[in-house]
Amino acid sequence: MKIVYLYQYFSTPEMSGDSRCFEMARRWAEAGHEVHVVTSSRTSGTDHSWMTTQADGAHIHWRSIPYNNGMSTIARIKAFLEFAWVAGPRARSLKGDVVFATSTPLTIILPALYATLFRKTPIVFEVRDLWPEMPIAAGYLRNPLLKLLARALERLAYKSSRRIVALSEGMAAGVKAANVPADKIVVAPNSCDVETLDLPSTIGIQYRESQSWLGARPFVVYCGTIGQLNDVSYLARLAAGMRARHSEAVFGIYGTGKEEAKVRAFAKEAGVLDVNFFMMGSVPKKDVPAILSAASVAASVFQPIPEMQANSANKFFDGLAAAKPVVINYGGWQAEILQSTGAGIVLDSLNIERAADALDAFLNDPERLAAAGVAGRRLASEQFSRDRIARLVLRTVEAAARREPLHAS
């Protein structure tokens, strides 16, 4: 079977960014399918022709369309539409047996529709965030006309797709709320790459030794975007609270984004920048395992927006896979998992004093930390393994390609 995989933000392990698409594509290729990923090279360039590379058996089709988290809303929408415009003809020319389109952005459905126009090729649409609810709640979409268009595009995506993959039960509920039949939806959360993140402790020790500021101090790691929704300034405030408690803990922030300068300025004003709060910039995905191996806990934070509770954060799953306790500051299904299994803790998102007290106590309880790491690894292996989730999504794609009745999935 030939699978055309549409995703605007594809990244290889040598690049920064999430690896779900790469890990899915290579596993589907290993299963014997011909996989073509149509994506963008997000750095500036003068060459606007398509370039094709190979990545672990998958064919990757790249087109230069600059994009970064620091762009204005209008500039980002322009990048979304530009990719939709050029990706449609490319995807259509590949003549796939099925088109798998993953959002965000929601505009990814447009090239999928063009690729299948006047053909019987089925579409499987993956929902990574609830659009347009999420950008509306975050304040990105304020224009009434843009909201109307976004909601229309959402309905079109759901109606045109043979199957819909949601990354959490909360997202699935949001899709159902748009009058989509439940038997059309499959829940397949982000997953854990235990094979890559299960490293000997010596790797973490070596990383600690390579960083003069780290040593043997308790280490809180955040690997991800520094954007408006992520609220990394929360971690800077938390670092200040920990310093006031004479804690030896340090925070390592790995990533870039629109709010980077703002977070840096806040941390400097709070007296924690390069003291117990270190902003390390973007790192390739392949470097993350060593960083997490050195971590005491892995952090995932967001603004206190109710719509964010349905998210399926890569940071959460990487922490579990690395057998590190996970620390979050939001509710929802991930909070419920941590609380029911003991794989981490949920910090107060509004009261920093209370959050600092809880984190300080957690970092000073070796037995609890160890138990949390074991619980996390168990979750990673038994519920969220990369192989398991990739097989689940592939079965969904195969069922769509065979045009099986919805109740058969």
Image (spheres, rainbow, N blue to C red):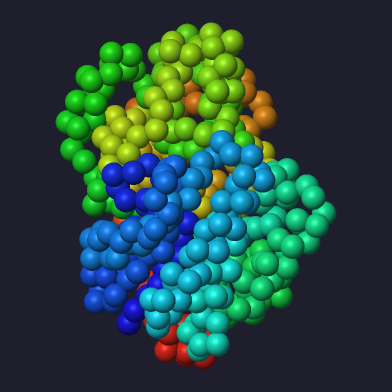
Residue 222 placed where, x, y %?
A: 44, 33
Instruction: Write the residue at 33% across / 58% down.
Output: 51
Residue 325 placed where, x, y %?
A: 40, 38
Instruction: Write the residue at 55% across / 63% down.
Output: 84
Residue 168, compared with residue 322, is above or below; it is: below
In this picture, residue 136 sits left or right of residue 245:
right
In the image, 50 versus 71, the foreground residue is 50
Residue 173, compared with residue 124, is above or below; it is: above
Instruction: Write the residue at 62% across / 71% down.
Output: 157
Residue lying farthest front?
46
User: Where is residue 298, by image quadrant?
Assistant: top left
Tally of numbered tags: 0
Where, quadrant-wise, is the N terminus in this rendering?
bottom left
Res. 394 visible in picture: yes
User: Where is residue 138, by image quadrant?
Assistant: top right
Residue 405, compared with residue 226, is above or below; it is: below
In this picture, residue 205 sits left or right of residue 176:
left
In the image, 64 versus 300, the foreground residue is 64
Residue 376 placed where, x, y %?
A: 37, 46
Residue 285, compared with residue 388, is above or below; it is: above
Res. 384 visible in picture: no
Instruction: Write the residue at 63% across / 33% down.
Output: 349
